[in-house]
Amino acid sequence: MSFSITLHDFPDADPQHRRAAETRYRSVLEEAFGSTAAIVTAVKAWQAVTTASDDAQVTSDERALALRFFQVSVQARKAVLRRASDPSHAYFEVTLH
């Protein structure tokens, strides 16, 4: 399984800057998780936690991995968009394939 990154709600970015930001975001994830497989597992944990109707549906390991994914995602967003003029609504979407 693989994944793609898409930057949304950042109208000031031309296509070249958008691709560069998506690539940098991916690099931060890869550095933190070490492999594509680990990122995919973390995204799946995030999806499980955020879509579960009650806590019994997810394990403590999934919750911990989802929290780590969230923290790394926030750090990656800050690192990539730190020089942007107004990144307040911009976000990165990670899509599994």
Image (cartoon, helix red, strand yellow):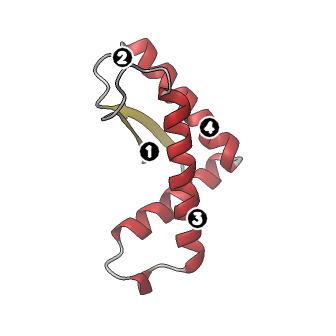
Judged from the image, the secondary structure of the residue bearing numbered disc 4 is helix
Inspect this view and state whether residue 2 appears: no
Quarter-of-image position of residue 18: top left
Mark 1 and mark 2 lie on one chain; the one further toward the N terminus is 2
59 in relation to 26, above or below: below
Task: Measuring from the top left, give residue 67's x and y in whole percent.
Answer: 53, 62
Judged from the image, the secondary structure of the residue bearing numbered disc 2 is loop
- Residue under label 4, please give it: 28
Disc nearest the viewer among 3 and 1: 3
Q: How far is mark 4 from mark 1, CA to CA?
A: 13 Å
Judged from the image, the secondary structure of the residue bearing numbered disc 3 is helix
Image mark for residue 13: 2
11 in relation to 28, above or below: above
Quarter-of-image position of residue 25: top right
Amino acid type, residue under disc 3 in the picture:
Leu
- Residue under label 1, please give it: 94
Q: Residue at x 31, y 16 (%)?
A: 12
- Residue under label 3, please give it: 65
Judged from the image, the secondary structure of the residue bearing numbered disc 1 is strand
